[in-house]
Amino acid sequence: MQQGDSMNITSREEGGKTLIALEGRLDTNTSPQLEEFMGTQFDAGKKDFEVDMAACDFVSSAGLRVIVAMQKRVVNNGSLLFRNVQPEVMDVFEMTGFSKILTFA
């Protein structure tokens, strides 16, 4: 497998929230994985999420698109919290203005 070909997404339920851990790059090749995963979560009625990004070291514009779609789905009826965001990824969030619309712990 070449770098960027897949992202490992794991999840578990805890305290009424879905805890999601992302491992790998969130880019053009992998963003459809996250989009599909989140679609199944929303379809199952889940609405409160915490995303651990400790092992996600890159987010492209395609990844940002999926993240903003996630935020839009929960803005009025749910929650989305990002944890352990790597400095280089936080730089991307800050440069794009995402740091103003997302919630971080």
Image (cartoon, rainbow, N blue to C red):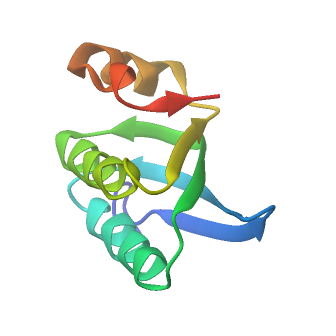
Residue 51 in picture, x, y percent from top left: 57, 49
Is 100 situated left or right of 104 in this image? left
Residue occupying image coordinates x 45% and y 62%: 7
90 relative to 47, above or below: above
Q: How many marks?
A: 0
Does 98 appear above or below 8? above
Where residue 53 appears, as percent x and y from the top left, is: 57, 42
x and y percentages locating residue 42 in the rendered image:
42, 75
Residue drawn at (20%, 48%) of the image: 65
Q: Quadrant of the C terminus?
A: top right
Locate the N terminus by quadrant: bottom left
Residue drawn at (38%, 51%) of the image:
76
Query: In the image, is 57 to the left or to the right of 61?
Result: right
Q: Residue furthest right?
A: 15
Taking depth in this image into account, of 3 and 36 the one nearest to the observer is 36
Q: Residue reaching furthest front? A: 76
In the depicted view, which residue is nearer to us: 48 or 99? 48
Where does residue 62 sit, x and y in percent of width and height?
Answer: 19, 49
Of 19 and 88, nearer the camera is 19
**Quarter where residue 21 is shown:** bottom right
Q: Residue at x 57, y 58 (%)?
A: 48
Q: Is residue 46 left or right of residue 59?
A: right
